[in-house]
Image (spheres, grey):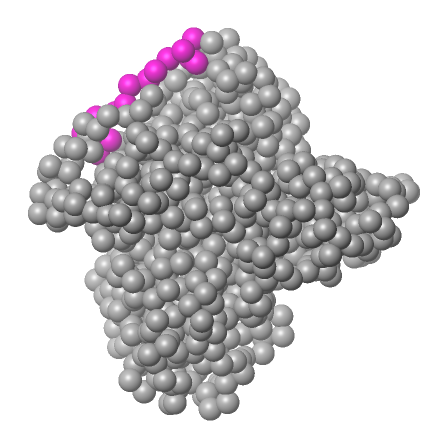
Amino acid sequence: MYKIDRLNELAKIVAEKREANAALEPRRMTAEEKDDLLSHFHPDYKQDEFTVLSAGVNKGDKVPTQLAELLQGKSRISADSVDLSKPDYDTDVLIIGGGGAGASCAIEADEAGVRAMIVTKLRIGDANTMMAEGGIQAADKPNDSPAIHYIDAFGGGHFAAKPELVKKLVTKAPEAIQWLNKLGVEFDKEPDGTMVTTHGGGTSRKRMHAAKDYSGAEIMRTLRDEVINRGIPVIDFTAAIEIILDENGRAAGAVLMNMETKQLLVARAKAVVIATGGAGRLHYQGFPTSNHYGATADGLILGYRVGAKLLYADTLQYHPTGTGYPEQIFGALVTEKVRSLGAKLVNIDGEVFMHPLETRDVTAASIIRECTARDKGIETNLGKAIWLDTPMIELIHGEGTIEKRIPAMLRMFGKYGIDIRKEPILVYPTLHYQNGGLDITDECATGVENLYAAGEAAGGIHGRNRLMGNSLLDVIVFGRNAGIYAAAKAKETAVPEKLTLAHIEKFNRELEECGAANDTASPMLLPHYARKDM
Amino acid sequence: MENMLNVYLFGKKYEIPAGLTIMTAMEYAGYELVRGCGCRNGFCGACATIYRIKGQVELHGCLACQTEVEEGMYVATLPFFPLEKRIYSIEEIKPDQQIMMQLYPEIYACIGCNACTKACTQELNVMQYIAYAQRGEYEKCAEESFDCVMCGVCSSRCPAGISHPQVAMLARRLNGKYIAPECGHLNDRVGEINEGIYDAEIAQLMAKSVDNIQEIKDMYNNREIEK
């Protein structure tokens, strides 16, 4: 039951129309309809929410205003804050970030026989990977192929992705699933071993593999366990705050900061991998986010300052179904799997206003239109929202389906008295994913020698919109890829002799000269949620 | 006027608006969290917390990000708990009963007090999954423990010193790798890709992605979608 009586009344309308709505097969939008919808209602098209960069390699490009402030922000140190001549850590491959990409990278680098080390500002596994609920794509069924997966991903990303990255994503996907399975990751399977797969928004084949709705958690905890078993050093509660270069401009380590004591440390490495994840906690355009606490775009800042280029940093993914109510879980992710299993989006009149499995950007824009221009949203104390008719799942697939397939969702709403088996839930778009990031080659190399990037921090794999299940896939495929290529590079690189932080002063000068300098400490590291007005 | 509650963070009283979670209550009180805060959505187990309501006996375990504050709540976070994880090679172990005896012999010292189950922040039947692990029934242990976020509150309450989440982690990996049925179509597809049978088709798509975007658009917009 909802605590607001009016919501219980409105939910009755949804219940009355449930049977008829369940039987509907809503038509898909045409390409023209989608373009028109996006240009009017998708947040990426709100020009006044973006700032054109005045300095750095992407000078002239627009990025979200909050990101611009950090990219052109103030380093937390100056070159003379640290003594680079006595490194505290010495390793071959330094991996910044302890999520799915960082852990996969570490395992492959270790497998290749080099020394890998992970630094993370929180704990290993405190990452968006852990929170991915719905699943991971791979074209491994007989009616599917990597080529079909390619078309889905490339088209879903508005034909903007880098073809060689899409190729790697789709052709390495089945191997990624096999690799995970061999590490002991559990996948939902039929008794004969056939993978239980479903659709995601924008997929043309049912290729979403899952581990209930704890898919990312199951993957992440297994990778973490493997990293520890291998004895790979994990330096937790330690953030990277600047990349260190050598005298030839190659990445050669990072300045680290203990998050609790603020002690500065120096890590020297032959190759550096940025696997720091996304930016949801920057709350672009004031949106709530489904991201973990540390998603503050640190890696983009670190890379940008030493000259690594960004690609599509102006495109963000607003997951169509963030929690719209209650406030305790406002913005938290309601997995797309809920729609994969048959739940439809319904407006205040109980009408199904769209096909529930359009791509995420189209679905989010459609929900925003329903709540604004069409005024068919459901008003709560937190703003407007749309119904997601979860009881429809059990109407279609039978009682018990929700507990078996989406237990995390049942638990999340159940804590606030809402039984998703019997009552529809309220959803509204939430800031979910950074489509762009550091521009990489298909070897995960950035434009700066010996500096690599993987996972959500990298850009170009998904073009301007990512499909459900291609992110978990991306962190595994490109995390491993970065480990393989960074290890190979480390093997042919001598221990860097002259370390330098000269880039800080150089970038500061450029900022001063163009008048873009600001005093925001950058990277942000953690959002500022403590109440100040006491 | 907001409904304000008296909440004791580490014993110190704060007035907190009703409806906040323990985590947002701490931030309302002015804490800048570094430890004890991770995904903020109930998946990572970083914010393990214990609390007791003033005047009541029962001690509760919870996740701070998923639990609303109550009047008279005494809260202590558990940002780290020393779980004992044993080291092994997943390639070299086997899913037999001996492996649990070798790696986690302390599970046989369980006295059946059920404190772990009562403390579980995910409402799992922890004692039951430990019983399955004792008997080498890893498939059942994996299923029963599946929703574990490894927050460690169970272990903080265990008189036998068991690190339940680590035991369950081992059981799930054994089940995922060795016990659950192999996936034939997955192995077939990996083989096909390695043989190169999709190379030409992918190369064509890549070429069109650069030279003939309209054709790719047509292919995408008219592709057949599986029902």
Q: Position of residue A90 (x, y in %)?
A: 49, 81
Q: Visible in this render: residue B49?
A: no
Tell me: residue A163, above or below residue B179: below
Whether A146 is among the magenta residues is no
Q: Nearer the viewer, residue B140 or A166?
A: B140
Q: Quadrant of residue A336?
A: top left
Q: Nearer the viewer, residue B118 or A304?
A: B118
Seen at 61% across and 54% down, the residue is B93
Q: Quadrant of residue B202?
A: top left
Q: Quadrant of residue A458?
A: bottom left
Seen at 72% across and 51% down, the residue is B98
Whether A25 is among the magenta residues is yes
Seen at 48% across and 71% down, the residue is A116
Residue stretch rendered in magenta on the structure: A20-35
Q: Quadrant of the N terminus of chain B?
A: top right
Asked if residue A51 lies left or right of residue A121, the reply is: left
